[in-house]
Amino acid sequence: MSLSSVKLIHDVDVLLNVMVQVQFITTEAPHLIRKAEDDVAAVEQTAERLRAEDDQLVGDVCNHLADVQPLVTMLATLTDQIRELEKYSQYLHCLSQIEDLRYLHFIDMLF
């Protein structure tokens, strides 16, 4: 086998390899590109759906906060009133204990 025959075989081998690659690219590449485009479209649809859901949730939260604000104000007022009543209750409890002590002292004086 001569050097030119070896080179020719090598060149033919390289050419066949290139032809296989070209065949793969022409048959598979369009399919892969189409799949990538479909994947991008699906991701864009999902992102748009999530944006719409986010907008809806933000609106719902804002509406809920607006609805409960009067209730929060009322609860704060009632909490303050309860604190005041607890102070009065404690005061009355102390007075009651003082009266009990006075009554006991009075009873002791009788006997």
Image (tube, helix red, strand yellow):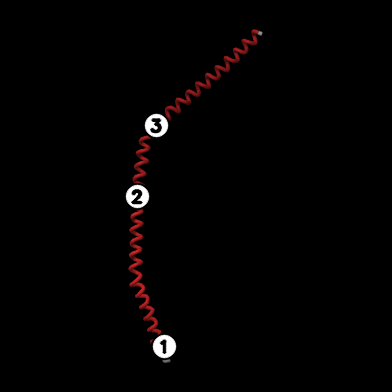
Q: Is residue 105 left or right of residue 10?
A: right
Residue 60 is drawn in which quadrant? top left
User: Which amino acid lies under the numbered mark 1 shown in the image of this protein?
Assistant: Val
Q: Tag on residue 51? A: 2
**SS category of the residue bearing label 2:** helix
As measured in the structure, the alpha-carbon distance from the residue carrying label 2 to the one carrying label 1 is 64 Å
Q: Is residue 15 above or below residue 27?
A: below
Residue 27 is drawn in which quadrant? bottom left
Q: Position of residue 23 (x, y in %)?
A: 35, 75
Give me the residue at 57% from left, 14% from top. Answer: 99
User: Which amino acid lies under the numbered mark 2 shown in the image of this protein?
Assistant: Arg
Q: Position of residue 51 (x, y in %)?
A: 35, 50
User: Which amino acid lies under the numbered mark 3 shown in the image of this protein?
Assistant: Leu
Q: Is residue 63 above or below residue 30?
A: above
Q: Earlier in the sequence, mark 3 or mark 2?
A: 2
Q: Is residue 104 left or right of residue 45?
A: right
Q: Is residue 107 left or right of residue 76?
A: right
> What residue is disc 1 on?
6
Q: Earlier in the sequence, mark 3 or mark 1?
A: 1
Q: Residues within 10 Å of mark 2 (few under 14, many from 20)?
A: few
Give me the residue at 35% from left, 47% from top. Answer: 53
Front in this rendered view, residue 53 or 62? 53
